Amino acid sequence: MTKKTDFQYPGKKATVSWNGRLCIHVGECGRAKGELFVGGRDPWCQPDLVSNEEVADVINRCPTGALTVDFADGSGTERPEPVNTVTVAYNGPLFIRGRLTIEDAPADAPGLAFRAALCRCGKSGKKPFCDNSHEKEGFSDYGAVGETGMDKPGAGGELTIKPIEDGPLMFSGGLTIRNSSGREAWHGDRVALCRCGESANKPFCDGAHKRVGFSSD
């Protein structure tokens, strides 16, 4: 039997959707104060118990795009953040926010237009998306960023992300890269980031995928 991975939580004012294929259980929803998400309750999510503003705020905290919301009155439509950012997680994935176009992203995952978690350990079974394999595989990289890129700050606009077959993630568009502590470390409009887990210059690609025979399948 195929396990159901997508759920909807309808209310009179809003319908929250959860895409389990993208969720890596960061916990921004479950730990949020208030009555929107309550563990052990059935249903777990009840959007009518809080304001539309609170629903939008909590949903937008989800770093993977797994959570989205549709409001009955058409309000609260999610908008991209003004600056496209990549945050290099401590021993974890690349967290992306902005106006995103991820090549071959599933059409039924609208949250990926704004938020995504992309694998950088090379072991995910859902490439290019993270599935928490970094934990099982013991991936170690603390998220330092040594290069600075261009002097000017990253911009908004469309950020295109192309997973290169058996190679890196190619980013095109205004972008700011933050290290794991939140420092704005790199600015530019084109960069190749490692997703094989073996680069000696993480988070940037150094061609190690060729040496180790990385497969993007």
Image (spheres, helix red, strand yellow):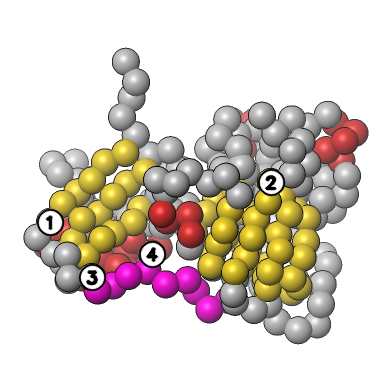
Residue drawn at (80%, 82%) of the image:
151
Q: Report how far apart the C-alphas of labels 1 and 4 lie in the structure.
A: 18 Å
1 and 2 marks in contact (CB < 8 Å):
no
Of the pair 17 and 142, the residue shown nearer to us:
17
Residue behind mark 4: 60
Task: Tell me where residue 56 sits by quadrant.
Answer: bottom left
- Crowd class of label 2 (few under 14; some 14 to 19; many from 20; radius 10 Å): many
Residue behind mark 2: 163
Residue 82 in the image: x percent, y percent?
53, 78
Task: Determine whether 191 is above or below 211 in the image.
Answer: below
Residue 62 in the image: x percent, y percent?
41, 57
Residue 103 in the image: x percent, y percent?
61, 49
Main SS, magenta region, reads: loop
Q: Which quarter of the image is occupied by the C terminus?
A: top right
Residue drawn at (74%, 44%) of the image:
164
Q: Residue placed farthest to the top in the image?
A: 1
Q: Report how far apart the C-alphas of labels 3 and 1 lie in the structure.
A: 14 Å
Q: Amino acid at mark 2?
A: Pro
- Crowd class of label 1 (few under 14; some 14 to 19; many from 20; radius 10 Å): some
Residue behind mark 1: 11
Task: Determine whether 17 is above or below 61 in the image.
Answer: above
Residue behind mark 3: 74
Q: Residue placed farthest to the bottom in the image?
A: 152
Q: Which quarter of the image is occupied by the N terminus?
A: top left
Q: Report how far apart the C-alphas of labels 1 and 2 lie in the structure.
A: 37 Å
Q: Amino acid at mark 3?
A: Gly
Specify start and end residues of the magenta stretch as a single range: 75-83
2 and 3 marks in contact (CB < 8 Å):
no
Task: Tell me where residue 190 sits by quadrant.
Answer: bottom right
Residue drawn at (48%, 62%) of the image:
114
